[in-house]
Image: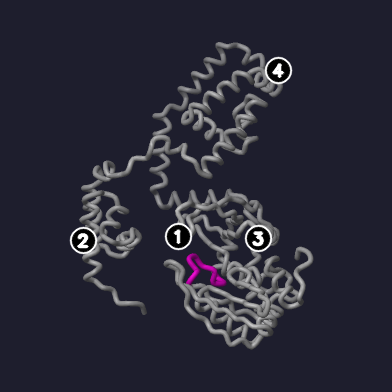
């Protein structure tokens, strides 16, 4: 049921926040002065209509003040060190190298894997890059003319041999799409999209025109095989369905780079068309100041049919604390629970015991223990854990015999499993690690 709301303290906090916001015009600064978290202010805006009206009135009076109060960005802000700056510099070097080969911006951008608009933006924003690009274009003018001449037809070469004709065409292009015309076109689009019927029709047509993102969208419609049961359990822990507000729903699975091969296996199973993407995620570990990069791999599949099937099986948005266990046939449950353990479980082998743990929602942990009691006779119980603002349930079972019987029930003769956990299970049960890759 939770604690009863303290209306008096809520009113005091709201008054303190509004008073501080009226003085600074910045929500984060006002929250610090009022002694609350900024997210609390946004909750009030969503749940408390009188507060939202009062805040709107204060905000309207402090718009100019907020512009003055905001901390100005330091000079050269966009040129600070960091992973994004390094990535941009690598892309700039790649496009300049490609530009030196052909002398054509469009071809150089395609070879470097960037949009041509990024090249022109860099030219406007970074003088050093613009100077290097202009010098390379001057030096590569001969190559550019040769390439263009080879691709033009004989009539086109004759037509564009005249300098006057080229200048006249350029002037026509500049006059045919003026800034005023662009703004008028944007206004027409905004006016049309303001009509709900037009917007719904436009969204339906645009989605229908998109190519399918996978060739096996019916995979999760019916869970009737061991591999489907496994992947459903894995989705319950590491899968995420998003995009319901925008209408572009998708399934996304993100794993550490060391488990990339497991995503490749799921990619093949669903016959996805978009490749698995690799990137570095930067964050500050608790108690540290310097951000650290974590290599991750991501598989994203935009498919309404897959998302609807997963939602029907209990894989919903923001499912961390609310996901319910799947109630399937008895012969498929070991495969389902193996997917759960591969996602949020732990296997630890010491000199004198084996430890098997699992964290997740209360319903998942409780149901797993009920199944594990039948599989190995464990007497472990769930208990509540907490990390930061996140509450979860966790269980841990250790010993010599029962954890080994549990791992044997989960991983022996497994048609699909996370390779590194399958290796640990084989080592614990059979005394030898996995000799080769599973798939």
Location of mark 4 (residue)? 154
Start-end of magenta stretch? 312-321
Q: In this view, does 429 lie to the left or right of 181?
A: right
**Residue at the image position 54 percent from the left and 32 percent from the top:** 119
**Residue at the image position 63 percent from the left and 24 percent from the top:** 103
Q: Which of marks 4 and 3 is in front?
A: 3
Q: Which of marks 1 and 4 is in front?
A: 1
Callout 4: few (<14), some (14-19), or many (20+) C-alpha neighbours within 10 Å? few
Q: Where is residue 279 in the image (x, y as percent from the top left)?
A: 58, 50
Q: Earlier in the sequence, mark 4 or mark 3?
A: 4
Secondary element under disc 1, as helix, strand or loop, is loop
Q: What number is the disc on residue 259? A: 3
Give the CA separation, mark 4 to mark 2.
77 Å
Give the CA separation, mark 1 to mark 4.
69 Å
Above or below: residue 340 compared with residue 71: below
Cβ atoms under marks 2 and 3 closer than 8 Å:
no
Location of mark 2 (residue)? 15
Q: Which of marks 2 and 3 is nearer the N terminus?
A: 2
Q: Quadrant of residue 162?
A: top right
Q: Position of residue 219 (x, y in %)?
A: 66, 65
Secondary element under disc 4, as helix, strand or loop, is helix
- Residue 122 seen by the camera: yes
Q: Where is residue 227 in the image (x, y as percent from the top left)?
A: 69, 70
Location of mark 1 (residue)? 287
């Amino acid at each position: 049921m939770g604690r009863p709301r303290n209306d008096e303290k809520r009113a005091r906090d709201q008054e303190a926040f509004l008073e501080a916001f009226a003085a600074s015009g910045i929500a984060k600064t006002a929250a610090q002065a009022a002694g609350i978290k900024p997210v609390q202010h946004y909750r009030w805006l969503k749940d408390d209509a009188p507060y939202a009206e009062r805040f709107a009135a204060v905000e309207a009076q402090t718009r100019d003040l907020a512009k003055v109060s905001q901390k100005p960005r330091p000079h050269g802000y966009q040129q600070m060190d960091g992973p994004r700056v390094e990535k941009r510099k690598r892309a700039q070097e790649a496009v300049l190298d490609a530009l030196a080969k052909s002398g054509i911006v469009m071809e150089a951008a395609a070879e470097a894997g960037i949009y041509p608009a990024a090249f022109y933006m860099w030219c406007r924003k970074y003088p050093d890059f613009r100077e290097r690009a202009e010098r390379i274009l001057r030096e590569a003018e001969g190559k550019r003319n040769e390439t263009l001449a080879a691709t033009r037809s004989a009539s086109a070469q004759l037509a564009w041999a005249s300098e006057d004709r080229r200048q006249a065409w350029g002037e026509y292009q500049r006059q045919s799409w003026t800034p005023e015309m662009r703004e008028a076109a944007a206004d027409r689009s905004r006016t049309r999209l303001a009509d709900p019927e037009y917007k719904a029709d436009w969204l339906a047509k645009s989605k229908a025109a998109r190519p399918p993102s996978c060739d096996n969208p019916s995979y999760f419609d019916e869970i009737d095989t061991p591999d489907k049961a496994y992947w459903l359990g894995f989705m319950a822990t590491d899968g995420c369905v998003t995009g319901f507000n925008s209408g572009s729903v998708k399934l996304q699975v993100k794993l550490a780079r060391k488990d990339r091969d497991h995503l490749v296996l799921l990619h093949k199973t669903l016959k996805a068309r978009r490749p698995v993407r690799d990137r570095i995620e930067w964050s500050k570990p608790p108690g540290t100041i310097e951000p650290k990069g974590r290599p991750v791999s991501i598989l994203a599949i935009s498919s309404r049919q897959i998302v609807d099937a997963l939602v029907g099986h209990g894989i919903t948005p923001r499912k961390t604390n609310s996901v319910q266990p799947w109630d399937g046939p008895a012969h498929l449950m070991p495969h389902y629970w193996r997917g759960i353990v591969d996602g949020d479980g732990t296997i630890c082998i010491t000199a004198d015991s084996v430890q098997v743990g699992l964290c997740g929602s209360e319903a998942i942990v409780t149901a797993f223990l009920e199944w594990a009691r039948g599989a190995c006779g464990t007497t472990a119980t769930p208990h509540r854990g907490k990390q930061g603002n996140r509450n979860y349930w966790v269980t841990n079972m250790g010993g010599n015999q029962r954890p080994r019987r549990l791992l044997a029930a989960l991983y022996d003769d497994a048609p699909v499993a996370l390779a590194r956990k399958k290796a640990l299970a084989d080592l614990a049960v059979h005394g030898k690690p996995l000799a080769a890759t599973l798939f």
